[in-house]
């Protein structure tokens, strides 16, 4: 439980949020690409839990929900309250390569990328903190006794106010970062 709400600011750099998918017949196509050259949020991006997203000067920026909205979310939903900027990118694919750049505005922040699967949400997450990156497999709630599992954890140096590039490749049962 969070005792104090921290303001989280996440920036995604222009020309870098790209999602290429591989369909069932092996064809490769770009599912989503944006250079964030307009001030409009692309229609494929859906803010979650009333978190606030904007596009300014080629950068997509996410902010947590307001304190009042977080309180309302806590009263009406289970689990996610809007403490951190969250969004959903509508897409459908079998395998994919996802590339994006990000930066923290403050030293003590974390970026979390969640990979979902058809018929199941929260397949895995990639957590990027200033000094550690980790890849975790979520439990399959349909399997009795299945639990979350840390697949990899490595030390990193991700400085605030500096851009960092991430490439996630999802191919069959494998995830490579």
Image (cartoon, rainbow, N blue to C red):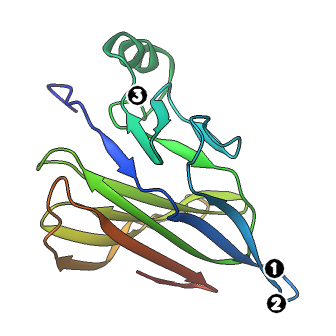
Q: Secondary structure at mark 2?
A: loop
Residue 123 x/y as whole percent? 53, 65
Residue 111 x/y as whole percent? 32, 54
Q: Are marks 2 and 1 in contact (CB under 8 Å)?
A: yes
The alpha-carbon separation of the residues under discs 1 and 3 comes to 34 Å
Answer with mark 1 or mark 3, whichever residue precedes in sequence.
Answer: 1
The alpha-carbon separation of the residues under discs 2 and 1 comes to 5 Å
Name the residue located 71 percent from the left edge and 40 percent from the top edge. Answer: 43
Name the residue located 16 percent from the left edge and 54 percent from the top edge. Answer: 160
Q: Quadrant of residue 28?
A: bottom right
Q: Quadrant of residue 121?
A: bottom right
Answer with mark 3 or mark 2, whichever residue precedes in sequence.
Answer: 2
The quarter of the picture where the C terminus appears is bottom left
Circle 3 packing at 10 Å, graded few (<14), some (14-19), many (20+), is many
Label annotation for residue 81: 3
Circle 1 packing at 10 Å, graded few (<14), some (14-19), many (20+), is some
Residue 3 appears left or right of 176: left
- Relative to 97, say whether 127 is above or below: above
Residue 91 x/y as whole percent? 72, 58
Label annotation for residue 26: 2
Mark in the foreground, 3 or 2: 2
Q: Quadrant of residue 166?
A: bottom left
């Amino acid at each position: 439980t969070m005792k104090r709400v921290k303001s989280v600011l996440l920036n995604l750099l222009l020309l870098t949020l790209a999602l290429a998918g591989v369909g069932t017949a092996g064809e490769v196509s770009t599912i989503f690409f944006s250079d964030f050259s307009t001030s409009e949020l692309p229609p494929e991006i859906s803010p979650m839990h009333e978190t606030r997203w904007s596009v300014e000067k080629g950068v997509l920026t996410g902010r947590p929900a307001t304190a009042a909205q977080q309180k309302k979310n806590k009263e009406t939903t289970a689990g996610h309250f809007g403490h951190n900027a969250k969004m959903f990118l509508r897409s459908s694919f079998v395998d994919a390569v996802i590339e994006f750049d990000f930066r923290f505005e403050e030293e003590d922040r974390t970026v979390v990328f969640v990979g979902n699967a058809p018929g199941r949400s929260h397949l895995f997450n990639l957590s990027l903190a200033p000094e550690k990156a980790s890849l975790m497999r979520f439990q399959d709630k349909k399997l009795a006794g299945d639990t979350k599992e840390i697949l990899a954890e490595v030390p990193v140096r991700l400085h605030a106010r500096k851009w960092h590039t991430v490439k996630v490749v999802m191919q069959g049962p494998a995830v490579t970062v």
